[in-house]
Image (cartoon, rainbow, N blue to C red):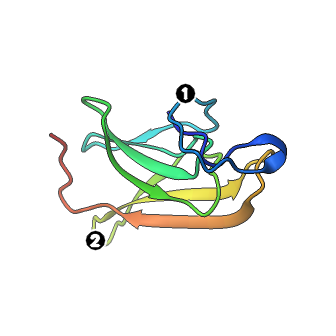
Amino acid sequence: MGTTQDLGPMGIKTHLPIPMGMPTLGGPTSTASGLVFFAGTQDYYLRALNSANGKEVWRERLPVGAVAAPLIYRSPKTGKEYVVISAGGMSHSPDVGDYIIAYALPDGTKQK
């Protein structure tokens, strides 16, 4: 899973989003509604996959790579679910940073 978009020799990005299997750097997190979130690829995307068929249903570009498993948080007050990711870049990447990013999941998320 992932592309070569943010990789290249000596830290120079190729900007070529060639889809290919890449070493993964963080684990997946799943929800009861059938979504699997994954951000451990070497391109800078947080992806949501349908757990029943493995198809990508959503992805969002992160400012830097995430070497972490996403966290699912449910508000005890509202019951709203969020996916949270810590993105800091990778040791071999030209981009680093300190980001904690949260995305609200749609209410009543069900996958087909």
Name which quarter of the figure residue 10 lies in: top right
Q: What quarter of the picture does the C terminus occupy?
A: top left
Label 2, residues with CA under 10 Å away: few <14, some 14-19, many ≥20: few
Give the Cα distance between marks 2 and 1.
39 Å
Of all residues, the one furthest to the right in this rendering is 10
Instruction: Check the image and name the residue furthest to the bottom.
Output: 77
First in sequence: mark 2 vs mark 1: 1
- The answer to which of 106 and 64 lies nearer the viewer is 64
Residue nearest the observer in this picture, 93 or 14: 14
- In the rendered image, the vertical position of residue 22 relative to residue 59, given as above or below: above
Instruction: Looking at the picture, tell me which residue is in the foreground, 9 or 34.
Output: 9
Between circles 2 and 1, the one closer to the viewer is 1
Q: Quadrant of residue 96?
A: bottom right
Residue at (60% x, 30% y) in the render: 22
Q: Position of residue 35 (x, y in %)?
A: 31, 43
Give residue 39's position: percent from left, percent from top.
53, 46
Residue at the location (71% across, 54% down)?
A: 89
Which amino acid type is shown beneath numbered disc 1? Gly
Residue appearing at x 78%, y 55% in the figure: 94
Residue sitting farthest toward the left: 112
Q: Give the amino acid type for the residue marked by disc 2 in the picture.
A: Thr
Q: Secondary structure at mark 2?
A: loop
Q: With 84 as the anchor, is 49 left or right in this view?
A: left
Q: Residue at x 70, y 66 (%)?
A: 98
Judge left or right: residue 21 versus residue 54. right
Residue 78: x, y in percent?
A: 28, 71
Q: Secondary structure at mark 1?
A: loop
Q: Are marks 2 and 1 in contact (CB under 8 Å)?
A: no
The residue where tag 2 is placed is: 78
Q: Note whether 57 is above or below 105 in the view shown.
A: above
**Counting other residues with Cα less than 10 Å from the Cα at mark 1, is it few (<14), some (14-19), or many (20 or more)?**
few
Residue beneath disc 1: 21
